[in-house]
Image: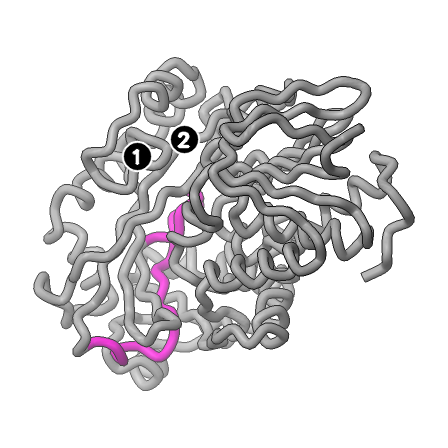
Amino acid sequence: MSDFDLIVVGGGIVGLASAREFMRAYPGLSVAVLEKEPAIAGHQTGRNSGVIHAGVYYAPGSLKARFCREGSADTMAFCREHGIPFDQCGKLIVATEEAELPRLKALTERARANGLDIEEMDGPELARREPHIRGIAGFLVKASGIVDYRAVAEAMAGEITAGGGTILTGAEVTGIEESPAGVSVETRRGRFTAPHLVACAGLMADRIARMCGVAADFRIVPFRGEYYRLAHRHDHIVQHLIYPVPDPDLPFLGVHLTRMIGGYVTVGPNAVLAFAREGYRFGDVNLRDLAEMIAYPGFRRAIRNNLRSGIDEMRNSLSKAHYLELCRRYCPELTLEDLMPYRAGVRAQAVLRDGTLLHDFLIEGTAATVHVCNAPSPAATSAMPIARHIVAHAATQWKLKGAPVAP
């Protein structure tokens, strides 16, 4: 007899949303969430910019485009239901030079193709809306906002435990065996069994997938996103989220100004290669993580293909003055003294064997398991639609107790 009907690996927001959705769809289902850290939401969920994304950047028809748009509405509705503060302040994407205008136009068309309500503006209108921001053109995405995703995750965890679910922290997964009867999971807290498993392991997604024999050939490469907090005198420097026009060949959005739900403003992140999957400081090195990256052909190809941007990001990491120049492109009044220390995050970026940095979400599986293999930003915004997608898979592929309850 199994210990649980379903095991979810990963206590970040995607794992918690998945556990919650299974319990809502299948009342009475016994669900356990296994989290390796002492508390939930310790990595990507608790160390991101807090932005509720609207789905501007993603290819129409992609999972990111669909899930992000749905997830933005889901996140705000969840916050209203649970009394979690959020602010639908909107996002301004700003071009600062003529060379960026074609990319801005293409991004405008993509945003409209994704069904978003946007407002274009010229330089004078931009200056009127945001007097401290310099730009020659831009557009406003009204559906974007800010929230504390750790608070959202904690509210989800509360629903899970209130509904009879189990959350086990300090339960790092060390091995998984799959058989016709289901899965057997070895952890630092013992062995647990279930007919089915959902893995939302973030920075460890590829290792968990390999334990289960998932066919997709990818590796997680960590990119550290370094932030600064602006000095208190700049707490009201912007009314919206201020983003640059991104490079369409990279999955990173560039250094931006973010109004935080705590009433202050951050600037960041950059995207510098980390030498440890949980390398939140520049000097953090994990020899196993580093050796795995170097041994993977896709990593070496990705480095060759993106060498120039990688060098630029490393330079910006090493030099506060260079980092400041990225900010001053659209906010010229900032000084070195305005950049105060703030926590970093690490993005779990899937890289394929051919060196491609995977842009879309990647969800794969085996007979008894589903794996969220690539879910960096905007995964926090998209957590609830990702969870519904996984439950829909279960409804057709797995024989769970009882019939699913319509949402």
The quarter of the image holding the C terminus is bottom right
Residue occupying the point 67% across, 31% down: 364
Vertically, is 283 above or below 79?
above
Q: Earlier in the sequence, mark 2 or mark 1?
A: 2
Magenta segment range? Answer: 234-254
Secondary structure at badge 2 equals: strand
Left or right placement of residue 347 versus residue 283 in this view = right
Residue occupying the point 59% across, 60% down: 158
Q: Name the kind of residue labelled 2 in the image.
A: Val
Residue occupying the point 56% across, 42% down: 168
Left or right placement of residue 112 versus residue 238 in this view = right
The quarter of the image holding the N terminus is top right
Q: Position of residue 254 (x, y in %)?
A: 34, 53
List the single residue furthest toward the bottom. 128
Residue occupying the point 76% across, 18% down: 179
Q: Position of residue 311 (x, y in %)?
A: 22, 35
Vertically, is 90 above or below 26?
below
Mark 1 crowd level (few <14, some 14–19, many ≥20, 10 Å Cα)? many
Q: Are marks 2 and 1 in contact (CB under 8 Å)?
A: yes
Q: Position of residue 190 (x, y in %)?
A: 57, 27
From the image, tell me which residue sits under label 1: 273
